[in-house]
Image (spheres, grey):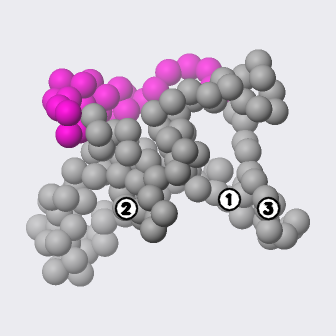
C-alpha cells in the first residue's frame, strides 16, 4: 500500500481482514487522496458473492424484507489470512481488540448508533429458522 501511494499507483486487493484495512486507511488515506491514488480493499473475496446474490434477488423480486445466506466451508484459510491472523494476535492491544469487534470499524455509523443486530461481529447466535445451526461472526453488517 505504501509503495503504491508513494509511486502514484492505484491499489486493489481482496483482503477481508478489516483490522488491517483499518490500519492501512489510517496510515495512507490522506496521502493517497492528495496524490489522486485510489486504495480499494475488500474488492471481492469475502463479500462480493453475498452482495451480488442479494442484489440479483432484489432486482428480480423487488425490495427484500431480509436476506439470509447459508454456506458450508471445508478446508483451511489462505496463507495470507493465516499470516495476518498470527501477526494480529501478536500485536493485539485493547484498541485493536475493540476495532476487531466493531461492526463499523471501516466507517458508516448510523445516526441511531449500534443496534443489537449489528453485534453479530462479536457473538454467535442460534439461527431462528434452522435451530440446529449456529451463526458465526459475520463479515458484513447490513
Find residue 112 and report its horizontal and vertical position in percent: 48, 63
Dot 3 surroundings within 10 Å: few (below 14), some, or many (20 or more)? Answer: few
Secondary structure category for the residue under label 3: loop
Pointer 2 residue? 107
Quadrant hosting residue 32: bottom left
Residue that sits furthest to the right in the current view: 61
- Dots 2, 1 in contact, CB < 8 A: no
Numbered circles on residues, count: 3
Dominant secondary structure (helix, strand or loop) of the stretch shown in magenta? helix
Q: Is residue 12 left or right of residue 134?
A: left
Q: Gap between marks 2 and 1, in whole Å?
A: 21 Å
Dot 2 surroundings within 10 Å: few (below 14), some, or many (20 or more)? Answer: few
Q: Quadrant of the N terminus?
A: bottom left
Indicate which disc, 2 or 3, sits on the residue closer to the N terminus. 3
In the rendered view, tell whether residue 103 sits above or below residue 106. above
**The residue stretch that appears in magenta:** 72-96
Pointer 3 residue? 64
Q: Quadrant of the C terminus?
A: bottom right
In the rendered view, tell whether residue 32 sits above or below residue 52. below
Find residue 98 and report its horizontal and vertical position in percent: 29, 39
Can residue 76 be seen here? The reply is yes
Secondary structure category for the residue under label 2: loop
Q: Gap between marks 1 and 3, in whole Å?
A: 14 Å
Residue 93 colored in magenta in the image:
yes
* Residue under the point 62% across and 21% down: 74
Quadrant hosting residue 125: top right
Residue 125 colored in magenta in the image:
no
Pointer 1 residue? 52
Amino acid at each position: 500500500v505504501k509503495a503504491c501511494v508513494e509511486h502514484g499507483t492505484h491499489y486493489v486487493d481482496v483482503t477481508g481482514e478489516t483490522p488491517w484495512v483499518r490500519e492501512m486507511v489510517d496510515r495512507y488515506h490522506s496521502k493517497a487522496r492528495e496524490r489522486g491514488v485510489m486504495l480499494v480493499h475488500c474488492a471481492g473475496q469475502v463479500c462480493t458473492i453475498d452482495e451480488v446474490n442479494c442484489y440479483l434477488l432484489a432486482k428480480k423480486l423487488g425490495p427484500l424484507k431480509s436476506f439470509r445466506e447459508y454456506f458450508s466451508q471445508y478446508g483451511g484459510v489462505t496463507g495470507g489470512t493465516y499470516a495476518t491472523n498470527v501477526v494480529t494476535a501478536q500485536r493485539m492491544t485493547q484498541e485493536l481488540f475493540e476495532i476487531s469487534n466493531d461492526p463499523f470499524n471501516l466507517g458508516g455509523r448510523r445516526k441511531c448508533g449500534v443496534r443489537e443486530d449489528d453485534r453479530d461481529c462479536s457473538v454467535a447466535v442460534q439461527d431462528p429458522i434452522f435451530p440446529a445451526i449456529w451463526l458465526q461472526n459475520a463479515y458484513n453488517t447490513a
